[in-house]
Amino acid sequence: MKKSITLDIFNEKGESLGKKKFYTTLDNKKSINQWIKRYDDKSNFRTGLLDTRGNDFQNQQYINIKSQDFIITAHSTGFYLTPNNLIPMAIYFSVRYCIKATWINNGDQFYRPNKKWEKDIEFQNDCLAFMLFHGKNRITAKEGINHFIPFSELEINAQEAFSSHFMLDFIQGKIKLQNYKKLESKTTQHKQTTINFSNQTPPAKTDSNFIPTKPLIFSKEAQAVLNAGKVLFKHYHTQTKDSKTYNANAALYDIKAHFQGFSSNSKSKPKMNLPKKAKDEAYKDKLGNLNYALKDLAKKLESKVYEYEFLLP
């Protein structure tokens, strides 16, 4: 039996768009959602949530990360983000978003990858950078402690100490956690409790423990994203430090909300305005630079998606 068929693709004007391969015998191949379940971690320190749905491109828009105080909807499946599973969750997120959804790939399925990705540390680190600054990063300081600031206070001109240095410590290879429940308690007791993850004893290593023991090394594309993100964060702290609404713990989502605002015409939940609505031209330029860097990184990740068989060519 033939395992695939290749068809010509045309647009509504009859112009050729190339070819599209369809696979016919993939019933026994496990999905990406079945794969990510192996990294489910309900017992360790929670830094946020990964919200998932479906295994194809038509469900791409529902994939996001959010603060741990959010409730996963009945139509979604989700996983807590913890130090142990942050890397595979970032890989899942990045694989789902580095390729744009179109009418052509709408039904394409994401699958359990081969094992090659496990040795590709640069790929893993690049996925983390991609997730941190993607538009579907919905982490917000308004819903609990923001553990996703990858910079120090000095780097971005913050006027107060951050409540958590988790992400910076993670990137610098300084995560050494001992008592997750104790740290979890500190997080929920008071939103402004300062949490530092240094000088602790690591948990017993498991196959799902991806806690780095030395500083992460990023590709030039991922480093460009981090640099552009740093410029954007610094602009926020510099421009709003004297404002009544200033928040030293502002997340990427909070920064966008500050400059772009929300639509008041929506009958349902207010939606964040598009960047073009922002009055701060410097902000729009810096956000544009960040988005450009993200697109460049996405192109780099795309080849890995096929090489590691998250998608079939």
Image (cartoon, rainbow, N blue to C red):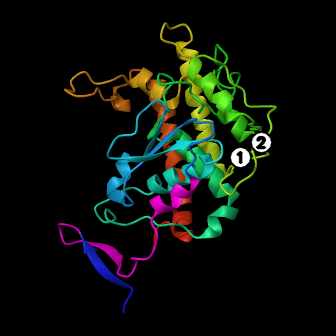
Question: Which of the image's four quarters has the N terminus?
Answer: bottom left
Q: On the rendered structure, is 312 left or right of 304?
A: left
Q: CA distance from mark 2 to mark 1?
A: 9 Å
x and y percent of residue 234 in the render? 60, 24
Disc with the residue nearer the chain's start (2 vs 1): 2
Residue that mark 2 sits on: 202
| Quarter location, residue 175 | top right
Who's the residue at 51% across and 54% down the image?
Answer: 92
Instruction: Using residue 112 as the reference point, say whether residue 183 is left or right of it.
Output: right
Up/down of 147 relative to 33, above or below: above
Whether residue 151 is visible here, answered yes or no, is no
Instruction: Tell me which corner region of the image, top left, top right, bottom left or bottom right, holds residue 152.
Output: top right
Residue 163 visible? The answer is yes
Q: Amino acid at mark 2?
A: Pro
Q: Quadrant of the C terminus?
A: bottom left
Residue 166 location (% of width, % of height) = 67, 32
Please name the residue shown 40% across and 39% down the image: 72
Residue in the foreground of this view, choosing between 43 and 101:
43
Front-lying residue, 291 or 111: 111
According to the picture, the residue beneath numbered tag 1 turns out to be 211
Q: Are marks 2 and 1 in contact (CB under 8 Å)?
A: yes
Is disc 1 placed on a helix, strand or loop?
loop
Whether residue 118 is in magenta: the answer is no
| Badge 1 amino acid | Ile
Which segment is the magenta one?
11-39
